[in-house]
């Protein structure tokens, strides 16, 4: 069965420093992986997706993620945090064994300090 | 090009009542999925509709039902409301192609008292 684990419930960084949000997944087949961001009282917005093309995926707002099959990881990074990046981030997995149901991680709250 | 729209934005109901939430998908999308997001948690998959039929279902009781109309819009119905049904209900639309990214509406905040 597919599952996704976000290793940190909260991450705090200073503005201008790098961001790392960690995600491990479990999937029987080649999964599709996504990162979504949710700002307070808003719906979710797609940041980036991996669907078996290049393992380094670039998304919006300077975010990128690297698919590492050997480590079953899909960590989200950004070289320099901005105050507007403060939000909840969700790692998401989808594969054929789940009928392409989209399974969300529990989320990581990113705090950005001035 | 309108994105996903949901109505109402907020709703307060009493235990035992029934509620209907509505969703219009992004233009060009034919698949609608519904999620329940409790406070401080990630969205939980309820079900997905395609071609007016339920295609996939998560671990939710039969009190949760839905419908998709010929114009691809969708409704989520919840009967016999419980306090624990209080949550943000998110609708997401996508293309029928597998692994098409989800486009979310801003959700309906349901409070059950």
Image: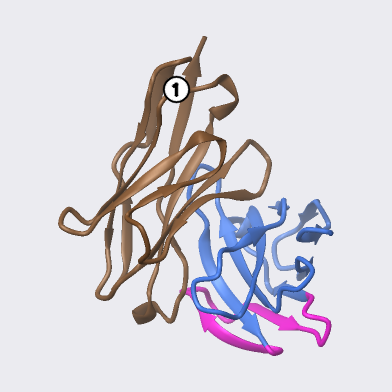
Q: Is residue A30 above or below residue B12?
A: below
Question: Which colour represents chain B?
Answer: blue
Residue at (38, 23) in percent of width and height: A18
Q: Which residues are magenta?
A: B51-73
Magenta stretch: includes residue B96: no
Q: Residue furthest top?
A: A114
Q: Residue furthest left?
A: A70
Residue B83 in the image: x percent, y percent? Answer: 61, 56
Left or right: residue B94 compared with residue B6: left
Left or right: residue B61 compared with residue B3: left
Residue A89 in the image: x percent, y percent? Answer: 48, 42
**Which chain does brown denote in the image?**
A
Residue at (50, 34) in percent of width and height: A62
Magenta stretch: includes residue B61: yes
Please name the residue that numbered disc 1 is placed on.
A80
Residue A67 in the image: x percent, y percent? Answer: 30, 53
Q: In which image quadrant can residue B46 be found?
A: bottom right
For label 1, the crowd category at 10 Å Cα-Cα, with few meaning under 14, some 14 to 19 and many 20 or more, is some
**Chain letter, disc 1 residue:** A
Residue at (39, 31) in percent of width and height: A10
Between A85 and A54, the residue placed more toward the observer is: A54
Q: Is residue A88 above or below residue A44?
A: above
Between B81 and A108, the residue placed more toward the observer is: A108
In terms of secondary structure, where does tag 1 sit? loop
Residue A64 in the image: x percent, y percent? Answer: 42, 42
Between B42 and B96, the residue placed more toward the observer is: B96
């Amino acid at each position: 069965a597919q599952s996704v684990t976000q290793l940190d419930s909260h991450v705090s960084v200073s503005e201008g420093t790098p961001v790392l949000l960690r995600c491990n997944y479990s999937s029987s087949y080649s999964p599709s992986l996504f990162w979504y961001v949710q700002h307070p009282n808003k719906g979710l917005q797609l940041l980036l997706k991996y669907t078996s093309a290049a393992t380094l995926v670039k998304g919006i707002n300077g975010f990128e993620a690297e698919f590492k099959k050997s480590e079953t990881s899909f960590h989200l990074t950004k070289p320099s945090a901005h105050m507007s990046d403060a939000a909840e981030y969700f790692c998401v997995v989808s594969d054929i064994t789940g009928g392409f149901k989209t399974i969300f991680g529990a989320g990581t709250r990113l705090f950005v300090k001035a | 090009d309108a994105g996903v729209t949901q109505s109402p934005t907020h709703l307060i109901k009493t235990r035992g009542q029934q509620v209907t939430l509505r969703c219009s998908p992004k233009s060009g999308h034919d698949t609608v999925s519904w999620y329940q997001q409790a406070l401080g948690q990630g969205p939980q998959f309820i079900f997905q509709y395609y071609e007016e039929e339920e295609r996939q279902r998560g671990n939710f009781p039969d009190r949760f039902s839905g419908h998709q109309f010929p114009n691809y819009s969708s409704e989520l119905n919840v009967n016999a409301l419980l306090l624990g049904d209080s949550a943000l209900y998110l609708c997401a639309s996508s293309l029928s192609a597998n692994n098409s990214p989800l486009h979310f509406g801003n959700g309906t905040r349901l409070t059950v008292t």
